[in-house]
Image: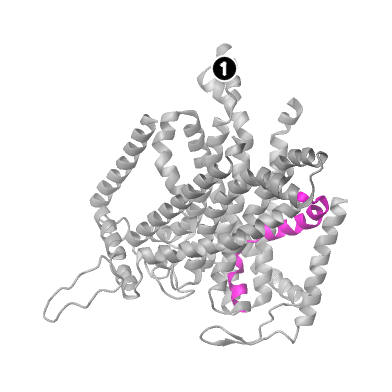
Amino acid sequence: MKQRTLLGLVSLLALIGAYTLVSSVVSRPDLIPPTQDIAEALGDLIGPGYQMPAPEGHEGHHHHSSAQVDTLIQQGVTLQASLGISTLRVLFGLAVGLPLGILMGLFMGWSRRADDYLHPIYVLLRSVPPLALITYIMLWLGHSEAHRLIPIVYAVAVTVVIPTYHGVRDVAGKYTVAARSLGARGPLLLAYVLLPAASPAVLGGLRTAIAIAWMTAVGAEMLMAENGMGNLLVGGGMWSSRLQTRSDPAVIIVGIVALAAAGWAMDAVAKIFTARFTRWAR
Amino acid sequence: MRVRRAVIALLSLAVIYGIAAEIGRGRLPDRIWMGSHYVENIQLLPTFRSLAEEGSFLIESNILVDSIAVSARRVLFGLVLGSLAGILLGLATGWAARVEYLADPWVTFFRFTPALALLPLYVVWFGYGETSKVLLIATNVAVVTLLGAHQGVRGVPRVYLEAAASLGAKGWLVFRKIVLPLAFPDIFASVRVAAGLAWVTIVVAELIDARMPSLGYLLALAGAYPRVPTMLIGIATVGALVLVFDLLALLLHARATRWMKRAA
């Protein structure tokens, strides 16, 4: 355990050190921004979204590290606000998508007949990348929040179906037979046997779903959203002209690190939650 | 029974769509407010006939085939490159604890980085061409297969290793004859998952950076006009490709692990 932390720290510091060295030797801030540029971009992005114009006669007001940072700050974009918006979208996707997917998985795992009919349809649904639907959803529902949220809901729902399905069929199957032979049926069977027995598999699926939800949220925001982490990464701009201007790698790196941290934190919460809920399985 | 029910389900889905499209023809709005302007002549639910017409146009003009070829090539290159790197690394981290400790922070970092977030960075580094897209897929695939290979090696029952050790086998021999074959199913399962992810990633990457003819570009064009039949055919094509890749992976897997069934 001790060696693990030590070696992990060593590798972390060694690579960051190597990066700092390389970036200062190469000195191409437009490609590999030096570590202090990244730190500066981070500071600028966390700072107040709107900077007061410099007082009269005071030359050289605060200079930001790049054009992208300037644009973002002019638009009032901050790292924490973007992260908050993306997190809300992810949470919405989970809140709506999880029940949908779990219900479908339960249904398919519960009834052989439902499985026979629904499985081929599910396979079709699963094969479609949720973000490919974004423009079609937009035609139906107009330019709104819907076409950012629906792909996330879709992705989450499709992801948790299979773990739930297997949880109900493979794991809970044994217990269900036993409970049935003792006379349990209907809601009792569902609430006291099936759901608890399937829960480890379902919660395992939850963690995959979190990762997929983040990926979908960022993709949707990169495609068309005026806020959120995806928007921060491509530095604003309009649909179809995104990525056309050269972005500032320092901002992108800050964004990526923030996203990784957010994903990791959410996963850690899910892990604790899972451990609490499935204590009996150990 | 299963097959019959599957056919019934899919057919009824198609029939419901057909009926909805016929009812919707002329009744659904064909002029849509897009936030800043109206777009005209929209078929929100194109009938099967207009889908067939559009499909035959896309096929005859080679647009569809070319797009599939470009996207599939990116997926294949990325898949091969990423799997190679990921599996090798995963075998190493699974086999040697020290390597695992060293790799741990970085594996965690990439695991929680949404793959698409890397796209703008790769575009800055490698330009808009093939390299950035292939590498984006490769990174995504490498993370998934690394975890698969790692788990595969870790999942090898201790008894086997001890039995081999007591018979005097060590090092490379144990790795090649025991660890590798036993880790194979896990590795394969992760490659299968990665293939699905690779398709999702590439189509969205092509949508965001819509330049070259490719499936994502086709979808982006269909969205810009907007042309719903093209859009739906594009979506269906991507879905079909994901399905075909998955089936191929399953077949290969069944073939490669036949010995396990025989042994059991």
Q: What percent of the width, then of the height, locates residue B196?
A: 61, 52
* Apparent side of residue A277 relative to residue B135 in the rendered image (left or right): right
Q: Chain of mark 1?
A: B
Looking at the image, residue B84 lies above or below residue B11: above
Whether residue A127 is visible here, answered yes or no, is no
Observer-nearest of A148 and B77: A148
Q: Residue at x 42, y 47 (%)?
A: B109
Observer-nearest of B156 and B91: B156
Residue on which disc 1 sits: B162
Q: Quadrant of residue B253?
A: top right
Q: Residue at x 33, y 38 (%)?
A: A9
* Apparent side of residue A248 relative to residue B171 in the rendered image (left or right): left
Residue type beneath disc 1: Glu
Q: Residue at x 60, y 16 (%)?
A: B163
Observer-nearest of B67 and A134: A134
Magenta region: A110-139
Give the secondary structure at mark 1: helix
Q: Residue at x 65, y 61 (%)?
A: A128
Q: What percent of the width, then of the height, locates residue B66?
A: 63, 64
Looking at the image, residue B176 lies above or below residue A187: above
Q: What percent of the width, then of the height, locates residue B104?
A: 42, 39
* Residue B191 forms part of the magenta stretch: no
* Residue A133 forms part of the magenta stretch: yes
Q: Quadrant of the C terminus of chain B?
A: top right
* Apparent side of residue A88 relative to residue A163 in the rendered image (left or right): left
